[in-house]
Image (cartoon, helix red, strand yellow):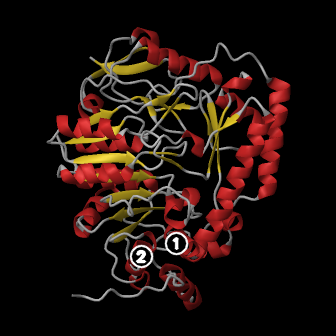
Amino acid sequence: MEEKRILDQNRAPIYEALQTFRQMRVVPFDVPGHKHGRGNPELTAFLGEKCVGIDVNSMKPLDNLCHPISVIHEAEELAADAFGAAHAFLMVGGTTSSVQSMVLSTCKRGDKIILPRNVHRSVINALVLCGAVPVYVNPEVDQRLGISLGMRREQVAKAIKENPDAVAVLVNNPTYYGICSDIRAIVKMAHEAGMVCLADEAHGTHFYFGDHMPVSAMAAGADMAAVSMHKSGGSLTQSSLLLIGPNVSEGHVRQIINLTQTTSGSYLLMSSLDISRRNLALRGKAVFAKVIEMADYAREEINAVGGYYAFGRELINGNSIFDFDPTKLSVHTRDIGLAGIEVYDILRDEYDIQIEFGDIGNILAYLSIGDRPQELERLVSALAEIRRRYRADGSGLLSQEYIDPEVVTSPQEAFYAPKKSVPLRESVGCVCSEFVMCYPPGIPILAPGERITAEILDYIEYAKIKGCSMTGPEDSEIRNINVLQ
């Protein structure tokens, strides 16, 4: 039996190779055309010589992301070791690319995949690409907060029993709000039924590097996990990891990734993944313990203001809220008479505070390795002032963040089918052929193949009036919507 090599988490092989490359003073007769920044002085002045000097093309000393055999391969081995995976792929197309590679690796046209409906648009986009058919497990909804929760074990078991030909089960670990399903139980059910278990861990990087955290997908035995290192892990925007377990073919997944990922992998993004993985492996536990401490303190202070509800572990019910991400500072705002998006706008426009998102009833302040207590004090003070200045009667506010869809046809069939554009209010009863969503969080209100109802249209128009950033449709003003002919 082959003895496992001990890996040194102090290493950062891509970073080290770039440092060596910088010292070599290589004359570039290759791309990129800015030639270490000389050809674009304005860009160099903006980003700095150090940055543009390592924005280079793949070459033998720096390896190749499409087929890594040296420094990138070593960086992937170190990432796999740090995250407890059989292999890790460095991804430069964001966690969208990781999620899509995960689905495309396991599903083909006509295959069924069991998943919650409150998935990120990247999951349903992957179904458009590969032609798989979604079997939705409609999540429970917390009526007070108006947010969708996790999948109940009984619902997943029922979906597996009714769809024994499904090939995969996908789990959010956690949701944007920090809600976790019982992923260990779901993995066990999926495997017993001969299905693979996939995890969207866009918001769960820190689960791998902290005590008193929900279980990570790899520790729970999931087959694949998409991990957004740039969110809570500290790497540059658009950099991500795709993790796989021991029963997944590394070579097959690499082929799937190479179908859509660029052949010109950014060394800025790859080196940021390398350095950030090292940072988390060496210091993650201590750093995230402080993040939890700050989040707990902020929850306590915000709840003391009155009117707001900064929710946390008290929601845990052992099933649809099996666990809660303690770093997530999610705050319910409807009781002060304001939609979350209204509080979001006031914080940015009047207090110079940019939070992650606001929806119909809640806001989310995203805490991670770069936050400090003094900024949280400023947020708490601003929320107290907003309550004093803007408090109103909230009886007319909508509360529901999630509406059960009626799926008529697969996302791929609907997306590519003949379609026509109709005014929004005339589309009731039609089948949608495009996406409509608030972004963030990027969870579709409507997806291709779903029936349009008056309730959904009410929600869309209400979200528009309140100032939610609506994306997805061909008509950018969302006055018209594309439906099947």
Residue behind mark 1: 277
Q: Is residue 240 left or right of 466 when viewed as pictured?
A: left
Residue displayed at 44% across by 81% down:
62
What's under tag 2, amino acid-wise?
Asp
Residue behind mark 2: 81
Residue displayed at 31% across by 37% down:
154
**Residue farthest left in this picture:** 165
Mark 1 element type = helix
What's under tag 1, amino acid-wise?
Arg
Q: Is residue 477 visible?
A: yes
Q: Relative to 45, is 9 above or below?
A: below
Residue displayed at 40% across by 72% down:
80
Density class for disc 2 (Cα within 10 Å; few <14, some 14-19, many ≥20) is some
Q: Quadrant of residue 463?
A: top right
Residue 350, horizontal then vertical, whole percent = 82, 36
* Disc ID at residue 229: none
